[in-house]
Image (spheres, coloured by chain):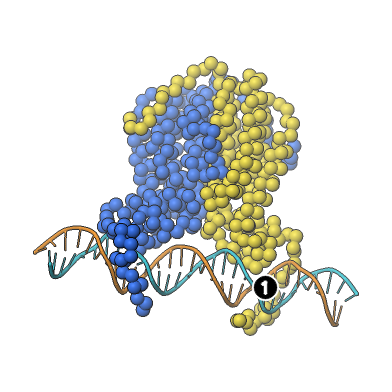
Chain colours: A blue, B yellow, C cyan, D orange
Amino acid sequence: MKLHAARPLSEASPDCRPPRRRRKEARPSELTAAALALFVEKGFAATRLDDVAARAGVSKGTLYLYFESKEALFKAVIEEGMVAALAAAAQRLSDFHGSAAELLQQLLFGWWEQIGQTPMAGVTKLIACESSNFPEVAQYYHERVLTRGRALLRTTLQRGVASGEFRPVDIETAIDVIMAPLLMLAISRFSLGFCNRKTTPETYLRTHFELLVKGLRGSSGEFVEFVEPLTGGKR
Amino acid sequence: MKLHAARPLSEASPDCRPPRRRRKEARPSELTAAALALFVEKGFAATRLDDVAARAGVSKGTLYLYFESKEALFKAVIEEGMVAALAAAAQRLSDFHGSAAELLQQLLFGWWEQIGQTPMAGVTKLIACESSNFPEVAQYYHERVLTRGRALLRTTLQRGVASGEFRPVDIETAIDVIMAPLLMLAISRFSLGFCNRKTTPETYLRTHFELLVKGLRGSSGEFVEFVEPLTGGKR
DNA sequence: TACATTACTGACCATTAAGTCATTAATGTA
DNA sequence: TACATTAATGACTTAATGGTCAGTAATGTA
């Protein structure tokens, strides 16, 4: 059995190494926060646990005191992110009264304030990138987060259509189309390939909102010509 | 120096191993196709070159005959995907005449036919996931693919606004909002976390198109109330 | 101050996978 | 058939990192 190195930590430059601190309560969330940032930046596989630990200011051994494995850490990151997401969603679910358009606006900007803007938006990118490596986690996210977000939009659209404020639309499909710019906004916050520095998130969301409201109202009976798209051959 | 195993490949079950074939021309594209599929499924770091080679029906050594390194293979995958993307875009760029709405429809569905539907859509997901690991590649993609896609949409919107077919809008921001559902469609093809089996891509694109056209026309002068979104505190 | 407890550490081990290269065999040519 | 060329192979080397654990020191208690 090999022994430890001769230097028992307490010598050489004295105050070079910060003193050890025992903070059992704070470690887990600090570790998941560090892990979220690195997973989002580099991807799960390319993130080294040494780096996660270093970013949280502890050693790798400490990380393993709180998480069974790298995969367990990943799941904890997602789970923690979703707790906050669900809380935010539930809050917005509260009985808001107003026009469907106003409710829609509250949903879009509330999402930005409480999710899109925060580090939690990284969870969206993580799911996009790692879903096939963690099918259970992806399914969990789909059921617990997306489905609830869809429910909020569904209620809004149904109310708008019922009251005549919105024209009749394919609600389930419209939900997908409405969510896409939000998801892309979350993803592009962490992806150089998509980020467009010319537009602020607020302007982006406002443009999205205005297009939506006008698009959902539509002058009823207005005609949108729709040529059957050419499938297959070119031209 | 250690010698190879005693069995010189040609014994035991004779036809169990498919015979070696020399196909210098076909290898590179077969390898990049295999790599694209696996990179998209597992991510760059989690993909093993042994698996890429196996999927292409060759050994890892062969892979290194054609690509300097794993990173070079990644870049070749993106590059190859973009060649096709640019060709498709250029084709659609061709002098199409018709209303701005018709042109917009051609762009959306043409994108689906020639990119979104094909394995090349995986490049979109790759860029989203790996852009911080390969900043140069992300930048290249941004300049060569997104910028050209944006240019096509810009021309369309400008024409629509100039002719009065569309109301005046913040064109640069509208471009982002219009592209987001396409990018999400590409990404969700490979991400269990987002895929919604209830909607076909065609229905999705048609709903997006109809919302857009009505949203861009808007009854000019129509009022969309916009409450200043509450920033910061809750309620 | 002496002692017990335990959060924390970091050297180490084991495994995995990128990258190498001596060898093999498919193919063309005389 | 003999030979030259080179595409293809896969065992090996090496570097990196997930995971372990004997040991260290911070903190509470008497």
Residue A137: % across, % down = 43, 52
Q: Residue at x 62, y 25 (%)?
A: A224
Camera-side residue of B116 and A230: B116
Q: Give the x, y percent position of residue D5.
A: 80, 71
Residue at image location 57% in from the left, 30% down from the top: B172
Residue extending furthest toward the top: B221
Q: Judge from the rendering whether residue B115 lies leftward or rightward of residue A235; answer left or right.
A: left
Residue B183 lies, in percent from the top left, at: 57, 41
The residue drawn where x is 44% and y is 29% is A104
Question: Residue at the spot x=58%, y=39% of the render?
Answer: B182
**B50 or A65: which is nearer to us?**
A65
Image quarter of residue A117: top left
For the question of whether residue A212 can be seen, the reply is no
Q: Chain of mark 1?
A: B
Identify the element where label 1 is drawn: loop
Q: Label 1 crowding class (10 Å Cα cut-off): few <14, some 14-19, many 20+?
A: few
Please give the residue where the numbered disc 1 appears in the rendered image. B17
